[in-house]
């Protein structure tokens, strides 16, 4: 955007109009003891050219490595039109659409986003985004505790197969509100929550969180888990990857009654990795629960002349400042990000998004077939997957990772810090952007690096293949 400063004459006219002698006079109520002429650590003014160079140099530090790293942030192809349209001034600089009469374009786009997201999740309603996937899960849990009046315990069952960062974020947000998170361990063979191990008499609890796919990339038995939650009078909260929903059963169809709330990270839908952000959180629910949904909700209506129009609905603008009595204290959505996602989904359509998901799965199958053929590599879990799989290396993982990084490869996510029982294990991912040549490059470097260590024949590999 162009920067157009005020001229000295314009500044003088404004000061004369309000009766002030100078800019400093506008701030004369600030005691001199609190004023500083200079800010320590803030550099002197820099030219636009110098700033552009600094930014370009910092961006270049990330490089362009060959990426097999997922773990919640995924490299997908984004059509050029997505951000060409998203960064048009009408979208890029639009303020939050409180004034419906001046914001119909933005409001309609947000309404279309809600419609697409609700359809993708098989649920009735969607909001117009939250901060990110982790905080969306926290809001879903707060929402479930408010909704489930049959439960007085404020207990929520949280599988260890939920993203570790999501679990940490949720704990930070809810632990001071008297909500208890009870961890459910996973089956060491499948990498999933076994419905058979769930307590027959779980007692009073508010909700069960169900990731699909889970952090290990494996597919949970969502039907059994959802039904278990409902049988025991708990709500079912789905945590989903939106791309996977193009080929997997949506949360609204899980079990006999469907999940009650669905949340997740929207980054896979048209948002570049961008050195770590920004992201956005998606949140959907059943119609009966919409009054407890946090964030912005756009409704469709008609004006006095019968023409269709759009407006913020179901929440007063001021509800966010009501502290503990508010549905949520989240005030800022990720409007620009969901603008990109809406355009992205519109360009791809249902068929295009399905093709992306199928190619992600197919590439991951190719990757795992090639990696598991190497001595010193085994697939850890016997379970169907979407586009991530856990492998174990028969060599010191830290050394292997460093050697692969030197080859401009991001080989995956080390799991031992979050899961001590998965020492020397790596979560690998392949999206539709990976080619056969990319996979062979990874396999070739890994084979050479493992060959420098004493060969260790892995035990019989589990039957990881997805059933057709």
Image (cartoon, grey):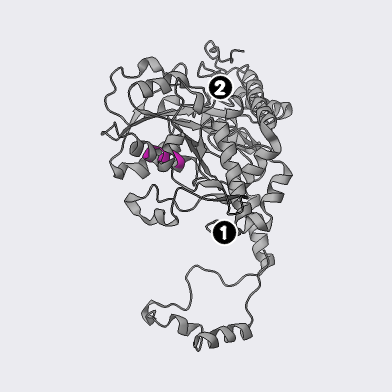
399 lies above or below 318: above
Q: Which disc number belongs to residue 184?
A: none
- 443 horizontally vs 418: left or right: right
- Callout 1 crowding tier (Cα within 10 Å): few <14, some 14–19, many ≥20: few
Q: Residue at x 70, y 25 (%)?
A: 440
Magenta stretch containing residue 137, yes or no?
yes
The residue that label 1 is drawn on is 95
Q: Which disc number belongs to residue 385?
A: 2
Q: Residue at x 45, y 20 (%)?
A: 256
* Nearer mark to the viewer, of 1 and 2: 1
**Where does the image place residue 153, in percent across and percent down from the top left?**
26, 33
Q: Name the residue nearer the viewer: 23 or 441.
A: 23
Mark 2: which secondary structure? loop
Magenta stretch containing residue 358, yes or no?
no
Q: Residue at x 73, y 45 (%)?
A: 81
Q: Where, quadrant-wise, is the N terminus in this rendering?
A: bottom right
How far apart are labels 1 and 2 at the CA level? 41 Å
**Disc 1 or 2, which lies upstream in sequence?**
1
129 lies above or below 11: above
**Where does the image place residue 306, in percent across and percent down from the top left?**
61, 50
234 lies above or below 81: above
What segment carries the magenta color?
136-142
Q: Name the residue nearer the viewer: 458 or 175.
A: 175
Mark 1: which secondary structure? loop
């Amino acid at each position: 955007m162009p920067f157009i400063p005020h001229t000295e004459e314009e500044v003088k006219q404004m000061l004369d109009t309000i009766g002030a002698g100078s800019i400093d006079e506008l701030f004369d109520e600030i005691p001199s003891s609190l004023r500083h002429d200079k800010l320590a650590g803030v550099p002197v003014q820099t030219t636009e050219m110098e700033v552009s160079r600094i930014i370009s140099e910092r961006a270049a530090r990330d490089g362009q490595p060959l990426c097999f790293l997922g773990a919640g942030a995924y490299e997908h192809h984004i059509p050029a039109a997505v951000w060409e349209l998203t960064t048009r001034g009408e979208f890029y600089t639009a303020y939050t659409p409180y004034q419906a009469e001046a914001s119909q374009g933005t409001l309609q786009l947000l309404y279309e986003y809600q419609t697409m997201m609700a359809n993708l999740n098989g649920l009735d309603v969607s909001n117009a985004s939250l901060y990110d996937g982790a905080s969306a899960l926290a809001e879903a849990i707060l929402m479930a505790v408010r909704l489930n009046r049959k439960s007085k315990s404020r207990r929520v069952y949280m599988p260890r197969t939920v993203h570790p960062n999501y679990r940490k974020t949720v704990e930070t947000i809810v632990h001071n509100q008297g909500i208890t998170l009870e961890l459910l361990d996973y089956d060491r063979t499948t990498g999933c929550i076994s419905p058979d191990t769930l307590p027959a008499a779980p007692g009073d609890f508010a909700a069960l969180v169900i990731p699909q796919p889970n952090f290990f990339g494996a597919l949970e038995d969502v039907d059994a888990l959802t039904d278990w939650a409902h049988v025991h009078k708990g709500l079912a909260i789905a945590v989903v990857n939106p791309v996977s929903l193009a080929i997997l059963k949506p949360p609204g169809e899980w079990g006999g009654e469907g999940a009650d709330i669905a949340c997740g990270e929207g980054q896979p839908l048209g948002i570049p990795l961008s050195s770590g952000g920004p992201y956005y959180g998606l949140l959907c629910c059943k119609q009966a629960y919409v009054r407890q949904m946090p964030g912005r909700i756009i409704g469709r209506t008609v004006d006095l002349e019968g023409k269709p129009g759009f407006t913020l609905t179901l929440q007063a603008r001021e509800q966010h400042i009501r502290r503990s009595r508010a549905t949520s204290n989240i005030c800022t959505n990720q409007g620009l990000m969901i603008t990109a996602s809406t355009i992205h989904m519109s360009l791809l359509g249902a068929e295009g998004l399905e093709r992306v998901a199928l190619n992600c799965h197919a590439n991951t199958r190719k990757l795992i077939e090639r990696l598991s053929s190497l001595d010193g590599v085994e697939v850890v879990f016997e379970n169907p997957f979407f586009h991530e799989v856990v492998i174990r290396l028969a060599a010191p993982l830290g050394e292997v990772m460093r050697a692969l990084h030197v080859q401009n490869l991001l080989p995956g996510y080390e799991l031992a810090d979050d899961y001590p029982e998965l020492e020397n294990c790596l979560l690998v991912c392949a999206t539709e952007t990976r080619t056969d040549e990319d996979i062979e490059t990874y396999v070739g470097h890994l084979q050479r690096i493992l060959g420098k260590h004493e060969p260790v024949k892995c035990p019989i590999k589990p039957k990881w293949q997805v059933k057709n």
